[in-house]
Amino acid sequence: MILRKKIDKVLSTALIIIMSIMVVNVLWQVFTRFIVGTPSSFTDELARYLMIWLGILGAAYVSGRNMHVAIDVLPQRATSDVQRRLKLIVYVFIIIFALLAMVVGGSRLVYITYVLGQHSPALQIPLAAVYLAIPLSGILIIFYKVSDILNLE
């Protein structure tokens, strides 16, 4: 539990920092476009990449806090033992998805873009760094769901 709380704190702080940078970036973009008259060349691309990191890491954070969207009509009407089994089944499916789609698939995407040497047009950062959010988020989701399984009541 202590490790989970530390990961929650680091992840929430990272999300706050990403969101803050994104707000400043977009304000700068609006300022340069409408006040100065010549829009900044990098702000659109930076906002896009920050939104990717914010959305994907935010999904891991929400998954860890068990605040994700769920249809819970069936579990509410079931006994506590059935509710526990349903949670276990759902957690296992989430782990399988996170492992196959996010960790394995995301790692392959990161590897391919790294090997091909793809860089973003305006910022010239490696696209592998942008896509790294996918396997990282998958690992976090797996950690959270395994922790949830170990703490099932």
Image (cartoon, helix red, strand yellow):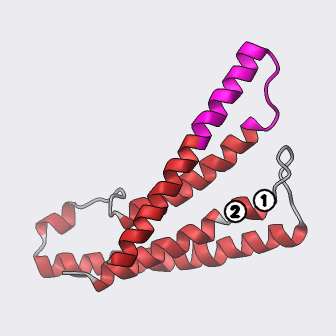
Q: Eyeballing the image, is 90 above or below 49? A: below
Q: Position of residue 63 (x, y in %)?
A: 40, 64
What is the number of callouts on the image? 2
Q: Residue at x 66, y 71 (%)?
A: 106
Identify the secondary structure beneath mark 2.
helix
Find residue 68 and name its label: none
Q: Is residue 42 magenta?
A: yes
Q: Nearer the viewer, residue 51 or 31?
A: 31
Q: Residue at x 54, y 67 (%)?
A: 137
- Residue 63 left/right relative to 86: right
- State yes or no: discs 2 and 1 in contact (Cβ < 8 Å): yes
Question: Which amino acid is tagged 2?
Answer: Tyr
The residue indicated by pointer 2 is: 131
Q: Position of residue 61 (x, y in %)?
A: 43, 61
Q: Residue at x 55, y 41 (%)?
A: 20
Dominant secondary-structure state across the stretch colored magenta: helix
Q: Is residue 46 magenta?
A: no
Q: Nearer the viewer, residue 52 or 27?
A: 27
Q: Quadrant of residue 74?
A: bottom left
Q: Residue furthest right?
A: 116
Q: Residues within 10 Å of mark 2 (few under 14, many from 20)?
A: many
- Residue 45 left/right relative to 148: right
The residue indicated by pointer 1 is: 127
Q: Quadrant of residue 147?
A: bottom left
Question: Which amino acid is tagged 1?
Answer: Leu
Identify the secondary structure beneath mark 1.
helix
Q: Quadrant of residue 37?
A: top right
Bounds of the magenta segment: 21-43
